[in-house]
Image: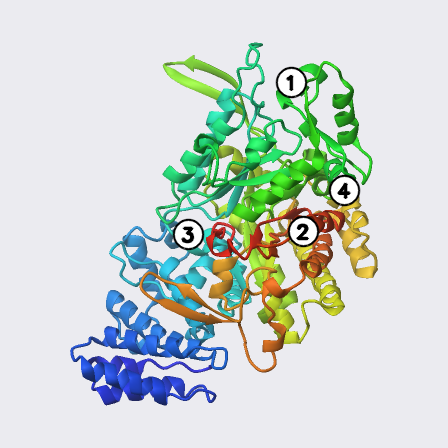
Amino acid sequence: MTTIEARNYHDLHNWQTGQLVEYFNSKVKEFSSLNPELAAAKIRQQLESKPGYSLHQATGLMILAALDRISIEEPDWTYVAARLYLDRLYDQAAKSRGYASWKLYGSFNDLVTSLTDKGLYSAQLSHAYSREEIKEIGSFIKPSKDLLFTYIGLVTLSDRYLTKSRNKEVFELPQERFLIIAMSLMKDEPKEKRLALIKEAYWALSNLYMTVATPTLSNAGKSYGQLSSCFIDTVEDDLRSIYDSNTDVATLSKNGGGLGVYLGKIRSRGSDIKRFKGTSSGVIPWMKQLNNTAVSVDQLGQRKGAVAVYLDVWHKDIFSFLDVRLNNGDERLRTHDLFTGVCIPDLFMEAVENREDWHLFDPHEVKSVMGFSLEDFWDEQKGSGSFRERYKQCTENPILSRRTVPAIDIMKSIMISQLETGTPYMFYRDTVNRMNPNPHEGMIYCSNLCTEIMQNMSATTVTEEFVKDGSIITVKKPGDFVVCNLSSVSLARAVLGDVLERLIPIQVRMLDNVIDQNTLPVPQALLTNQKYRSIGLGTFGWHHLLARKGIRWESEEAVKYCEELYEDIAYLTVKASMELSQEKGAYPIFKGSDWQTGEYFDKREYTGERWMNLKNRIKESGVRNAYMMAVAPNSSTSIIAGSTASIDPIFRKQYSEEKKDYRIPVTAPDLGPDTTWYYQSVYLIDQHWSIRQNAKRQRHIDQAVSFNLYVRNDIKAKELLDLHLHAFNAGLKTTYYVRSTSDTDSIEECESCSS
């Protein structure tokens, strides 16, 4: 897997069947464990039975023959198929760009010029770099790195992310995409060191030690699209805020972003409007509008918009909210295209455990009668704090209307919806806010589309609107409109390659530069991004790493290793942000944060010399980023990198990825005699072990984790409840989907957050 040769393919344009079979055999012989005879015989038979195949069609036959051989016993056929596909890709790019295909990669300088002229690359690249610099940057390309791709990884990268002409002609090749990303993210670095930084970023990407988020992978260097993954908006309880938020959702969805939207401030059904009693229709009609926006304003024509909405568990509309994705009932009250999340205080989970009553309130009435907003409070300590004090005041006020139900009844509705639809997500608001590194600047009401982002939030409101000189002037007070900037470490490759200390600093720099390179179409998102400079460094390939190290998932060894590894990653990430702060300055609101006071380290009980030294250095120089770590779902990018998704176990050792006209067999990564015993299917794994691992992981991650619960569709209610109680009591901030054996294939992955 260290050499690459395309001249043979170039010479096949006037091929004979024997030459083509010989070419195929040469690819197979790179892998001593594979026997080409059966596949070669099939290829020969097909070619001879139907003359007239073009070279590319014949290559397709060879690829399919290789794919047919992929199995648990012979997984390396995926690399044979990838090499065949690569040669065809090189040939197509050479024809589009006008160079000899045996060169593999043509002139990088010419590519930048050509795609800029075609309006596909941003002109900023040519303006930022001289032709001499671009020529030198092109010399960084290592075609041999293309041999790291599996077939499904290469096809995914090619189909979705490589830059093609508007006629779908192949122009950009894999290593060029990585290099363009590095160029784009480093273009504003000091000239005397930016080429070295580009080389380092290219090293990280080309070796598949890390991946960037889908929007960055797709849009970096291009003339359109933004680079951030997800956004979170807070909607105020007034008509203008609701409609303005809908417009912002549409604008960001058009540009490829996924969204989380907090609706907990909106008055409930039956509330008063301008003191007219019983006139409000509650949150469901506004969810219907968001649902229509998500469907009608798709993400760059690739898929429908992705929006998750969150509501507090004490809101009077909670039962109708929990029913919105069910397949039965009144369709006028359904929003099948939205995802849902429930914001849960400690007090509710205690009421569930103790089988106590729970009171539902209208947030508008609470604000009018009590003079405060219940959603603005949280418990500062486990078992005591502002939320439960304010909640108690509400329950004791005889004027305040409420609906009282057993807490377990709400929990049952949550679990019924989860088993049918996978949602709602669980957002443990008190745990989240207690561990918020920036409580001096606000609070966190909900999470994003994939439950891994936790950042301060507030609503944007119109403060003034007037006519001046024939123009309408609208003045808004911008809220904290959360932006997620993501990338992920490929654990198996980076840890086993012993490169974390070198990798994480360049990764943090790349993420930080996304903030400055990004073009965000919603102004308050741009302001929030600059104010907090938040990033989300995550990971994938946890199961892959365990298998390579010979560690069973259901073991104390795995739990212990999880804590040790993620503490190291956290230390390196915080240290990298601190060092970047010394170079470029701390984020604007660093003063007063838990980073500055040292509370961040105290809350996580960090001890030892390295942590104490880092704590003291941060007090002096700051950190560059207000929020730093988040583990996203990253399904598509982990496929490109040839590893397992996020921190999830595999579904099965072998499966088929469905394409329009054929299936691609896929096996677990690095499957062999030494690893096969450690690749246990997720539905055979006791989920309590996964919760234990994630509790250790969560301690070291300042934001959160897209953490799925996998259950059988015949799970008993008590067993699912026990999982939720364990997750809550273990200190998890969120849980993502509840994936049951009956609905796994129907749950859509979050493409935006894939990193």
> Horizontal placement of 21 versus 754: left or right?
left
Residue 402 image point, x, y percent: 68, 22
Q: Is any part of residue 517 visible from this angle? A: yes
Judged from the image, the secondary structure of the residue bearing numbered disc 4 is: helix
Residue 93 image point, x, y percent: 29, 67
Q: Which residue is mark 2?
A: 582
Task: Return the disc, 3 or 1, that comes first in the chain's sequence.
Answer: 3
> Horizontal placement of 685 versus 557: left or right?
left
Q: Amino acid at mark 1?
A: Glu
Residue 403 image point, x, y percent: 67, 24
Please report the residue visible at 19 percent of the width from the left and 82 percent of the height from the top.
Answer: 49
Task: Return the disc, 4 or 2, that comes first in the chain's sequence.
Answer: 4
- Numbered mark located on residue 219 in the image: 3
Q: Is any part of residue 138 visible from this angle? A: no
Determine whether label 2 and label 3 are within 8 Å by CB.
no
Which is in the foreground here, disc 1 or disc 2?
1
| Cα–Cα gap, marks 3 and 1 | 45 Å
Task: Return the disc, 4 or 3, that comes first in the chain's sequence.
Answer: 3
Determine whether label 1 and label 2 are within 8 Å by CB.
no
Q: Which residue is mark 4?
A: 353
Q: How many marks?
A: 4
Q: Amino acid at mark 4?
A: Glu
| Cα–Cα gap, marks 2 and 3 | 30 Å
Label 2 Cα crowd, 10 Å radius (few <14 / some 14-19 / many 20+): some
Q: Which residue is mark 1?
A: 365
Task: Return the disc, 1 or 2, that comes first in the chain's sequence.
Answer: 1
Q: Amino acid at mark 2?
A: Gln
Which is in the foreground here, disc 4 or disc 3?
4
Judged from the image, the secondary structure of the residue bearing numbered disc 3 is: helix
- Quarter of the rendering containing residue 318: top right
